Image (spheres, helix red, strand yellow):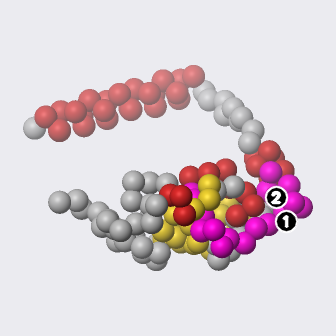
Amino acid sequence: MSVHQYDKNMRPDEEFIKGEYCYLVPGNKCCLLDGRRTTGVIEEYFEESGMFRWRITKYEDKGKYWDLPAEEISRFQFEKDFKKLDGKKIKEIEDTIIKYNKKITIKTNPRDREITQNKVKETKKNIKEWLKN
């Protein structure tokens, strides 16, 4: 018996369309491409950060939400009666993704880094010992 709820009568994937930026419209219903096709709805798109809010509408997490980067829309599939964004809005989403898709390097003090790595090693060792007991 699973600890998670599951719908044995879930709709087949053929009834949905793969997630793309154009479907980041509040109110669009979609399913996460997980094993049980958890259903939800796009609740909001945050233009300033390129993130969207997906509200879960089924199973034990019903009512909870995830805030995800726009690129994660490919992890969803959408109802065929979806609304679409126009080309200008899609371009704005793509530009926001480009704006934030930058590699950053945070310089560290070599001594501080060594201290932190040693703490991580020690913590892992303690966890392994605890799990053995």
Q: Nearer the viewer, residue 4 or 36?
A: 36
Between the C-alphas of marks 1 and 2, the distance is: 6 Å
Q: Which mark is residue 75?
A: none
The reply to whether the magenta stretch includes residue 88 is yes
Secondary element at image label 1:
loop
The kind of residue tagged 1 is: Asp
Residue placed at 38% from the left, 32% from the top? 120
What's drawn in magenta, residue-wise?
A: 76-94
Is residue 69 shown above or below 26?
A: above
Q: Is residue 70 left or right of residue 4?
A: right
- Contact between labelled residues 2 and 1, with CB atoms less than 8 Å apart: yes
Badge 1: how crowded within 10 Å, few (<14), some, or many (20+)?
Answer: few
Q: Is residue 108 left or right of residue 5?
A: right
Secondary element at image label 2:
helix
Badge 2: how crowded within 10 Å, few (<14), some, or many (20+)?
Answer: some
- Coordinates of residue 123 in the picture (x, y in percent): 31, 35
Residue placed at 10% from the left, 38% from the top? 133
In the orientation shown, which residue stands out farthest toward the left? 133
Q: Quadrant of the N terminus?
A: bottom left
- Coordinates of residue 45 in the picture (x, y in percent): 70, 67
Is residue 42 shown above or below 97?
A: below
In the orientation shown, which residue stands out farthest toward the front? 14
The kind of residue tagged 2 is: Ile
Is residue 68 shown above or below 129?
A: below
Name the residue that disc number 2 marks: 90
Q: Nearer the viewer, residue 112 or 97?
A: 97
Q: Is residue 38 left or right of residue 133?
A: right
Camera sees residue 69: no
Name the residue that disc number 1 marks: 86
Residue placed at 24% from the left, 61% from the top? 3
